[in-house]
Amino acid sequence: MTSTPGLARRRTLAAVMSAVLVLGAVACGGDDGGDDQGLAQAGATGVDDGSELTLWTRAPLEKQAKLLVEAYNAGHRNRVELTVVPNDDYVAKVGAAAGSGSLPDLFAADVVYVPNWVSQGLFRDLTTNIDGLDFKEAVNKGHLAAGTRDGREHVLPFVLDLSMLFWNKKLFTEAGLDPDKAPASLAEYAAAAKAVQAIGRDGVYGTATGLNCGGCLAFTWFPSIWAAGGEVLGADGATSDLAGDTAQQVFRTWADLWRSGAVLPSSAGETGPTWTAAFTEGKVGLMFYPATLLSSTPFDVGVAGIPGPDGGASTFVGGDGIGVSKDSRKSAQAWNFLNWMMSEQAQVEVLAKNRDVVSRADLANNRYAAQDPRLVTINQLAGRGDTPVALNFQQAFNAPGSPWLALVRSQVLQGGGDIRKQNDQITAVLKQ
Amino acid sequence: MQTTAPGRRGSRLLGWLYAAPTAVFVVALFVVPLLLVLKMAASRWPLLAGDQGLNAPDNLTRAVSHRLFHDSVVFTVKYTLLATVLLIALGLGMALLVQESSRWNNLLRASFLIPSALGLASASLLFYVLYSPYASPFAPLMRRLDLTFLGSPNAALLSTVFLVVWRYAGFYMVLMLVGLQSIPADVFEAARADGAGRWQIFRRVTLPLLRPTLALATVLCVTGSLLAFEQFYLLTKGGPDNSTVTVVQLIYLIAFQGQNDLGVAAALSVLVLLALVLLNALQLRAFRPEEH
């Protein structure tokens, strides 16, 4: 509150104004975008002539991005310079750079923001180049679709992050559950959570989630609706379908779990930073959890798709898409990186080797996955999962205090409220 | 005469030269950004697309009709009242407590002041961990008592106010101490000689003579509280259920977290600026020394 008020006021103004200054400078600079011919002349593999390329990504994908960039730099004359930006600052940083025409050659975007950024013209049209890939049919559909506008493709999958059902085998055994069998429906999931809770050990809980984190909830609860054949958004991404029967069933299951005390109590206020921590420490029985964390989960876990209320399985195909920015002057060289990134060499020998998900369905059964059947489960589900496409996804779902959060918190924590009205609130934001 | 004229002109030039660096900074860091914000507030200005031309007064109407606008104003005022009353009262109380210089009082003064050495963001992070039902050292206790620091709207407000009081009470104590020590001792002696009691002295002598200090402290505190951001951004992110969204947080939310509309955010900033100027003017007037 009260550092000297002058300072505080100036700081607030400065926050907005520094952005203004940057943008103001741009307005004068005029629109001198990148090289428009580069991509057309790039050919199938692009140009590798020893150029310096810049690449931005956000912190949660730092590990995968570093591996990819190091492997590329080791085998090419081009050099990619990687910049990792804190998650919460990424939109602001890209926004300022987009306004001032200083975007890097390549940048990744949370796949749920991709439709909006594509429609704002931040990415180059890669249709010809992507159509030239002879394995195009195998490239993850969700990510490709998110980056497609008016039939033109702009984005390739950079790192896939899937939401999966993880369970702690040791706690399952203690609770008298079969440690090798995944709960087949949301009802079984709830029963398993209550069984783990019934062990009654201090600090051990049945399940956990991020009830004050819109992104976490969309990432882990939408698949339950998809698994039952339902939809969360209307066809054009401008309406919300979250008041349907399946959705209500999902919310009721969670409301019941919450009342029963089988959910980690701190989940109620969890805004995201520590939403997976308790599971990673082995204190939670089972949880919908990001697949990218498989390699850093130190104990024996089972992995399955996220079930619907009565069975089925689906996943939220999240993670980041990547494309060539509107400001790049080395788009032919940038395509060289993207083309290599999609190759079997990068997908298998870099991503799969690190136990990450591959972006190509035809490589799902690679030699590293063969050593760990859980990876095959994840890779195969990637092709059947879903990625919601909506221009205002961030504001409707991810933003703190979004109408989606209001709906979930009212339905689950308070166990009621007019769900149609709450759903209309989401639609109102999606339509803006 | 003839020799003084060029001398005076020279000193005038010298005066301008002395003032120039400050003037340059004021223009570059305050006037220019202010004009830019005003322009932004009157323009359609999406974060990702940049300036799209004038659209006044659309931004203003959209800022005022934002679904969180009303709640955030009410909450900010509520928080400001609570924080100001507590900080001024505690600051004054602590200052009276440690007014006389003795070894124990020096120790007390130092311990009251130590939290002020910590940045607000660092302090907020510290309390984020202390309040966390998961990572806090008090977590077992919180579980047993079924207690939550940030889980309900009132708890979140009080927990944040506690952090702010912890962080700033020492600062206001120092302000009050300076004010108290500027009151001449003989005034108190005279009052005591006239047979005034402690309470009478406080009411009739200390408070009136402390008026300028109180004015300064209140202006600082009210302004700072109305612009509250870091503590809520770090501790609550506006939650639970949007119950702790302050106006500045709303500006940030509109600019960078979803709506991504710098125009509406700038319009809201301008409103806040106007409200602050008005409020500060009123406060200074209210604390003006009484005319005799």
Image (cartoon, rainbow, N blue to C red):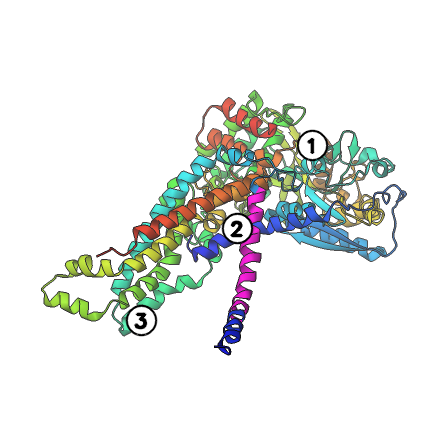
First in residue order: circle 1 vs circle 2: 2
Label 1 with label 2: CB-CB less than 8 Å: no
Name the residue that disc number 2 marks: A13
Q: Chain of mark 3?
A: B
Specify whether disc 1 shares its chain with disc 3: no
Task: Tell me whether the residue at label 1 lies in contact with that at label 3, contact meaning CB atoms closer than 8 angstroms.
Answer: no
Does residue B70 appear to the left or right of B200 in the view shown? right
What label does residue B67 carry, if any?
none
Q: Amino acid at mark 3?
A: Asn
Q: Is residue B290 magenta?
A: no
Query: What span is colored magenta in the figure?
Result: B14-40
Q: Is residue A233 above or below residue A335?
A: above
What's the mark number on residue A385? 1
Cα distance between the residues tagged 3 and 2: 38 Å
Q: Nearer the viewer, residue A339 or B58?
A: B58
Question: The disc numbered 1 marks a residue on which chain?
Answer: A
Identity, as a three-letter code, of the amino acid under mark 1 = Gly
Mark 1 vs mark 2: same chain?
yes
Label 2's element?
Answer: helix
Q: Position of residue A35 (x, y in %)?
A: 83, 46
Position in image of residue B46 (x %, y %)? 63, 39
Question: Which mark lies nearer to you, 1 or 3?
Answer: 3
How many angstroms separate mark 1 from mark 2 (CA)? 44 Å
Q: How far is mark 1 from mark 3, CA to CA? A: 66 Å
For the point 62% across and 46% down, which residue is it?
A: A92
Q: Residues within 10 Å of mark 1 (few under 14, many from 20)?
A: many
Q: How many neighbours does mark 2 have within 10 angstroms: few (below 14), some (14-19), or many (20 or more)?
A: many
Q: Residue furthest top?
A: A245
